[in-house]
Amino acid sequence: MLAALVCIVGHTGAARADRAVARALVEEGQRLSGAGRAALALERLERAIDEDPDYLPAYEVAVALWLRAGKFEPVIRHLARVTLRHPRYGFGWYTLAFAYRRTGRHDLAVLCYREYLELRPAEPDPYFGMGMSLVALDRREEAAASFGRYLEMEHRPEQREFVTRARRELARLGAPAPADATPGTVGWGLLRRALERIDAAARAAGRGFAAR
């Protein structure tokens, strides 16, 4: 997995960290974003990443602005590098999987979803996204298994739309849905809470990102 991403992004380079400068730039970027000055905000955030490639909050703020602008390539370029540097960065893997899936690179999306699931095996959301990418790759048995796992785990009432879609995909694949796949009242997972901050940006790209 890591070798595949290295081929895409090239050498990650050495960190030349200046944490205080990076933090100040992120704070300025947040103020500019709040004032509706997205281009300037992104300039500050990209400078923060250059100053300290290991300052993870910079990526999370920048992702919201990139997605709002429909720019998936910067998301991929930066997060592919940072997940190599921080292989346990769940936000990075999940967001990278989402970006690869939205840009049609489904083989890489599946790999990133699997990396994320190594860290958060109890999260249902990545099973749905991975299932969609596996369908696109015509890996039908794996897709059915992924949707089936999603339906076994998903019990949140607000996810009824995705439960219905997963059932529909399973039917199209000729696989039965788990009998107890009914939305209930389980609370949101750790990553979902982290991604909630950028959900509005993803909706602008066509789908609630925090959900998938």
Image (cartoon, rainbow, N blue to C red):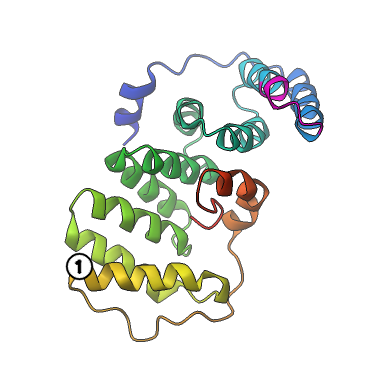
Say which element carries label 1: helix
Q: Amino acid at mark 1?
A: Leu
Relative image position of residue 205 (x, y in whole percent):
52, 43
Q: Tell whether 77 sits left or right of 25.
A: left
Residue placed under numbered mark 1 in the picture: 173
Relative image position of residue 66 (x, y in whole percent):
57, 32
Residue 193 belongs to magenta span: no
* Most common SS among magenta residues: helix
Q: Is residue 75 above or below residue 157?
A: above
Residue 36 belongs to magenta span: yes
In which quadrant of the rendered image does the N terminus lie?
A: top left
Q: State the image quarter where residue 162 is shown.
A: bottom left
Q: Which residues are magenta?
A: 35-42
Relative image position of residue 148 (x, y in whole percent):
31, 71
Q: Is residue 187 above or below residue 109?
A: below
Residue at 20% x, 67% y: name it: 173
Residue at 50% x, 48% y: name it: 206
Residue at 46% x, 72% y: name it: 154
Badge 1 crowding class, 10 Å Cα cut-off, few under 14, some 14 to 19, many 20 or more, is some
Q: Is residue 206 above or below residue 211?
A: above
Q: Tell whether 106 sits left or right of 173.
A: right
Q: Tell whether 123 sits left or right of 203.
A: left
